[in-house]
Image (cartoon, helix red, strand yellow):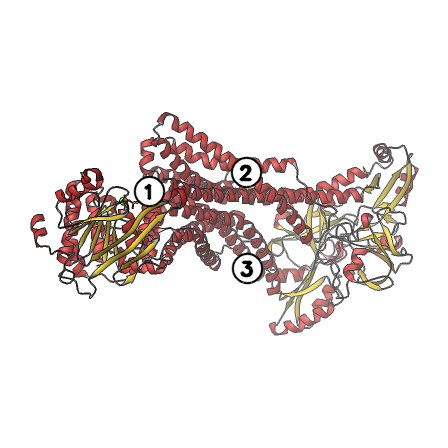
Amino acid sequence: MFRSMLRGLLTHKLRLALSALAVILGTMFMSGAFVAGDTFAQGFTALFSTVNRDIDVEVTAKDTSPGGQNAQLGTPTALLDQQDVDTVQKVDGVAKTTPGVYSAGARLIGSDGKVVGGNGPPQQGIAWQDQDPLIQLRQGRPPQAANEIAINQGLSTDSGFGLGQTANVITLEPPTPYTIVGIFGFPGDRPSLAGETTVAFTLAQAQRVLLNAPGKFTSIDVTAASGVSDDTLRDRIAAALPDDVVRTGAQVAEEQQSATSSFVNILKTGLVVFALIGMFTGAFLIFNTFSMLVAQRTRELALYRSFGASRGQVNRSVLLESVLLGLAASIVGLALGILVGYILNKALQAFIDASLPVSGVVVRAYAVLTTLAVGTAFTVVAALIPALRASRVPPIAAMRDAVTPDKPLTRLTVAGAVILAAGGLLLGLGVAHVGDLPTWLTLGIGAALTFLGVALLAPIISRPLTTAAGKAFAWSVPGRLGARNTGRNPRRTAVTAAALMIGVALATGAGVFAQSAKAGISNAFERDVNAQLAVTTSFSQGPGANAGFPPELEQTMAALPGVSAAVALRTDTVNLNGSDRFVLAGDAQAASTIFNLKPVAGNVRELDPGEVLLDQDTADALRLGVGDRVTMRTARAAPVTLDVVGIFKPNQAISSSLISSADAGGFRSPFAQQGFVQVANDSQVPQVRAELDRLFANNPEVTVNDQSQLIDQANSFVDILLGIVNTLLALTIIVAVLGVVNTLLLSVFERTRELGLIRAVGMSRAQVGRMITVESVLISVFGALLGIVIGVGLGVAIVKALGDEFLSLTVPWGYLLITLALAIVAGAIAAVLPAIRAARLNVLQAIAYE
Amino acid sequence: MDAAGRTVLVRPDHDLFTRGNQVTASDPVAARADDVWKVYGSGEAEVIALRGVSVTFQRGVFTAIMGPSGSGKSTLMHCLAGLDSVTRGEVHIGETRVTGLGDSGLTKLRRDKVGFIFQQFNLLPTLSAKENILLPLSIAGRKPDDAWFDTVIKTVALQDRLGHRPAQLSGGQQQRVACARALVARPEVIFADEPTGNLDSKSGADVLGFLRDSVKTYGQTIVMVTHDPVAASYADRVIFLADGAVVDELSDPTPDMVLDRMKRLDNPAEVAR
Ligand SMILES: Nc1ncnc2c1ncn2[C@@H]1O[C@H](COP(=O)(O)OP(=O)(O)O)[C@@H](O)[C@H]1O
Ligand SMILES: [Mg+2]
């Protein structure tokens, strides 16, 4: 008795530990997300407060251009001039004004011919300021001639260029050689502020090559005279320059901060969602463990005949135990999460190529409290459900069949069917966009209900499946026994499988979505892009980012031998009749040929200056028809009036209105960003490609691709997204596999005597191991099959809901097969520990066990 | 039948070579314990369960091991069957030396040479009666001999119950299934630990009668642990254990003879007087 109790306790402990592990993983993930996000954000806070530390007040021009701040591409257009500087200087309380030029558009070309810093943090250009306290000259001297630059220490290290060397820099001008005369760093001995690269020109050169606006500035930094507060000075300057934006340094830092924190919050939310899914899965495991604990305890108490007290006692003990378990596990999870947060923060910085000025980790109170509360709440709820359910069962019945409850599944099945139907209905509504709720919410709730419904139906579904599996394994005794065992406790098998189902369903849904997106991309290219070759630009980020190629190359490309049509597209946000719209400029005739533009009204033809081809959506939104006139306001030129000569049906390649290149003079960027080249004869493609390569040889930001490369690029983006989603779902799957381990340990424990018996009649350890493995694999495969079926359903629903215009519904069979194969492997791995336990059982003790 | 059955039995203990119409093996000894000691625990908690037990079980003989509770009956059986290791001495089953066998050797032994009937929970609940009966053979990957299977089933009168699950069978039927399972594999020895301990007297008598018949008719060797004199009277030979040692032996027992010996074992003072 004592020995069996001890053994029970040990098994019990292991299972509690597994349940705790599920909670630990979930809370670890969650607090890791919080800590990483907060540390990351703190890094930016530190960065921006450093940057703005010495600025008392900053003046910038109000950006009234179409798209304003959101138009990230092109040259800054909100500029100040010397007159503004003088105005500020005259304001009472101003000690000093420092007019500045800043643009994220100075790319230094490394010795490998590529832009240093690539697609990382901004590659910025500035005008050298002698008294800028942020910039500290380390070597050499400031630039004094137009062809001289100073670069930051980080850029010097990354590029290998040092003092006295000559490097090519791309600005609004094509690559131009400059001599490096100075190398500078930042306060705190930092080589860069956050991994960005900076090229400092003379003021006049900066105004010319960064802004294309001699005599203009992007900002005026103001130092207050002593005794004047920042706020007072701001108000005085604002009164003097009512049309400009005047902020204190603290305000600037705060605004820059809030721009990044919304990004950080999205990141944090995403990670927390996955943490919650993992915890939800863990709840199934905890549910199973506590079902067993409760059953045991109810029986014990029934044995000690304290019927009256037993219910409350069981509930109280379960409550206490689950609170302790949940809290302890959450604390461990939190501690590990802080470590994860530290690593994740480093990984994030590496990912965006930044090195933020923050050391250690930021652990905020809300992160601690939320993690502990959520971890504990999940545990307690999952544990209390079986306790409350058990307290409705008379103790005598509990005594008799607590170990293998064979209660009818009718009620469960009916409930499951109803919930599943509700979930299906919601998914349907989501797909059809019926109802007031946002689609994602309808689909989300529909998916959750579907999971729940299927989880409830799983016991009844498991029966025929395990029977069939039993037949399939009839040739092997361990296999047959394992299969039969799987069917013995349909509820437990179902709960275990359902946990796995969630992760697999989400991964499958993501797989269907990804595959459909890829197919959609390929279709779009095949259907809507009749060009064998494309010229693409690597976009750098930030205001002033200016990559591209001269639009005049359109004619050059069209004139290449073998080319039947070529278009170079310039893009910008403009304002059409008061509404901000994205438009394209280029040869409309060629675009029509290449992109299969179908006219809805008027003609789709070559455009003269002053003419526009509207896409149907824009035409509808602005209520414009052929023959109407539309006023276009651009960032850099006076408004022009355009005649609508045609309206076309937007497709995957072109969904914005087209104007002629001649009217694009006011675009922020003087460059074209994309080119498409149609070659008359496929055999001439290599030759044309070689010509194009030569044409763009001096521009490291422009690449020539063929169609399949373009598709591959787009697909690889989808694959990366799918990879990230699946990596995050791995948490859920690991927890579910722990659940399988848990259930099997439970089974081994409960079937101790049976295991002794089959060992006594000659079964070997290996055979026992195989028997457990079969059970494990069957549970896993069952879960995976449910998950795959639901996941395909969810994927289809999402694809349908988002519209199959750019998604072409495709089921990734290979991916599904791999998922199934992985489930088999996971099942086999989950079986290892329980199988070892079962095989190691002392036969005699097992037989004597009761 | 009981009385008649017993009268035709040949004394096993003095007739090593002629016993058993089915026995063909050259060695007439099915199992043997030589000076077996079994000590549990150590120091204060030391319990000597067996003290130098030497006993031989002939082929085709039905032997009962009797003794008061705690006398070491189960321990002896477990040691004989290779379910437990001995502290000292040696155990043989047929020509196999059980002492010192590793797990795979023991598995093979249980598979090929030994059958078990336990007091209860003898069957796997997920298997039908027939599957339970054939389990040892399936585990060993051996084909059942159809004629022998039919014979066994007929003897235990389970023809109509073969497709039933254990839960659908009475206790007596379950034990008969267990007997059939032990017998179908034709092991060297069947060990039965209180096989009728949980049965009413009618079912118990059925099972015991069946065990005795299998010995008599088919030459099966059976070693049965029991504390019930009536059960012991079905055996050809009774070995009495007390305090871990063999203290007495009876051939051709009747319930009264067994009861008498037991009384004396239970109350040594009375014997002395
Ligand atoms: N695993 C064990 N650990 C310690 N003592 C044991 C163990 N098994 C049996 N014993 C002791 O050995 C003695 C013989 O036990 P057992 O063979 O079960 O007796 P019987 O079957 O005749 O009732 C008893 O004193 C018992 O308490
Ligand atoms: Mg005993």
Q: Are marks 3 and 2 on the same chain?
A: yes
Image marks 2 and 1: residues in contact by CB distance under 8 Å: no
| Res B109 quadrant in image | bottom left
Residue topped by disc 1:
A850
What is the distance, in whole Å, between disc 3 and disc 2 at their CAs?
53 Å
Question: Can you say whether A306 is above or below A817 in the image?
Answer: above
Q: Position of residue A29 (x, y in %)?
A: 58, 45
Question: Label 1 is found on which chain of the structure?
Answer: A
Q: Nearer the viewer, residue A681 or A172?
A: A172
- Please, what is the three-letter code of the amino acid marked with disc 3? Asn
- Mark 1 to mark 3 CA distance (whole Å): 65 Å
Q: Which mark sits nearer the N-terminus, 2 or 1?
A: 2
Dot in front, 2 or 1: 1
Depicted A391 relative to depicted B30: above or below: above
Q: Residue furthest top?
A: A308
Q: Circle 3 is placed at which residue position?
A: A523
Q: Which residue is mark 2?
A: A328
In the image, what residue type sits under mark 2? Answer: Ala
- Of the residues tagged 3 and 2, which is closer to the observer? 2
Quadrant containing the C terminus of chain A in the rendered view: top left
Ligand 1 image-quadrant field? top left
Query: CA gap, disc 2 to disc 1?
Result: 33 Å
Q: Is residue A539 left or right of residue A298?
A: right
Dots 2 and 1 on the same chain: yes
Q: Is residue A512 left or right of residue A68?
A: left
The N terminus of chain A is located in which quarter?
Answer: top left
- Residue B90 vs residue B172, the one in the foreground: B90
**Residue sitting at 47 percent across and 46 percent down?**
A502
Residue placed most toward the observer, A103 or A350:
A350
Task: Identify the residue at horizontal 86%, vertical 48% (top origin).
Answer: A216
In the rendered structure, which amino acid carries the disc numbered 1?
Answer: Glu
Quadrant of residue A570 within the rendered picture? bottom right
